[in-house]
């Protein structure tokens, strides 16, 4: 599901997300939250599907901001899809197990959304300075 979602979003968007749209803006308060939960300390410990797409030596700041938006969209779709297995509890029972595993999966992808938004805030500050 994760790979297919990423492939579909990439095919549709082609890393051309508009990082200036309201949905992608990160405010001061939100960034303070990311600092409070120490995103900077743990973000590099999370696995990345394609490190090259986030390489500042290979891409402009604008391109990197677009990539963070597209990656955020992928993870937001996966978060929503993480709750679809709960439907299986109708057939198999064990609703609590499906809810717990769905919440854990969604929580992991939420961490990636936090990383993208944390990085985009910093990228936008650099873009606005130049």
Image: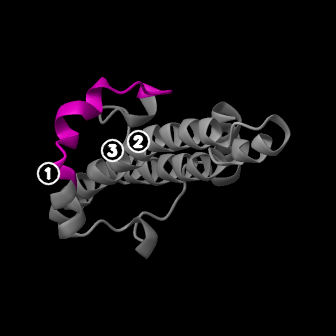
Q: Secondary structure at mark 1?
A: helix
Residue 130 in sight: no
**Foreground: disc 3 or disc 1:** 1
Q: Are marks 3 and 1 in contact (CB under 8 Å)?
A: no
Residue 58 % position (x, y): 37, 32
Q: Nearer the viewer, residue 11 or 23?
A: 23
Relative to the observer, which residue lies in front, 62 or 49? 49
* Residue 46 in magenta stretch: yes
- Residue 115: mark in rendering: 3
- Residue 51 spot, x, y in % from top left: 42, 26
**Residue at image point 37% right, 54% down:** 62
Magenta range is 34-51
Location of residue 32 (image quadrant):
bottom left
Query: x%, y% of residue 3?
Result: 65, 31
Residue at which label 2 appears: 112
Q: Nearer the viewer, residue 79 or 10?
A: 79
**Mark closer to the chain start, 3 or 1:** 1
Q: Which residue is mark 1?
A: 36
Say how many tags the image has.
Answer: 3
Name the residue at 29% across, 24% down.
45
Would residue 24 appear left or right of 31 to someone viewing this image?
A: right
Kind of element beneath mark 2: helix
- Whole-number angstrom distance, CA of label 3 to CA of label 2: 5 Å
Mark 3 nearby-residue class (10 Å; few <14, some 14–19, many ≥20): many
């Amino acid at each position: 599901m994760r790979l297919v979602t990423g492939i579909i979003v990439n095919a549709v968007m082609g890393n051309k997300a508009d990082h200036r749209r309201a949905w992608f803006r990160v405010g001061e308060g939100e960034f303070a939250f990311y600092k409070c939960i120490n995103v900077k300390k743990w973000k590099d410990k999370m696995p990345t599907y394609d490190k090259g797409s986030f390489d500042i030596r290979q891409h402009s700041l604008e391109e990197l901001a677009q990539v963070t938006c597209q990656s955020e969209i992928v993870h937001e779709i996966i978060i929503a899809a993480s709750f679809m297995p709960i439907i299986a509890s109708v057939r198999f029972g064990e609703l609590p197990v499906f809810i717990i595993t769905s919440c854990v999966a969604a929580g992991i992808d939420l961490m990636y959304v936090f990383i993208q938004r944390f990085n985009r805030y910093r990228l936008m500050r650099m873009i606005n300075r130049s």
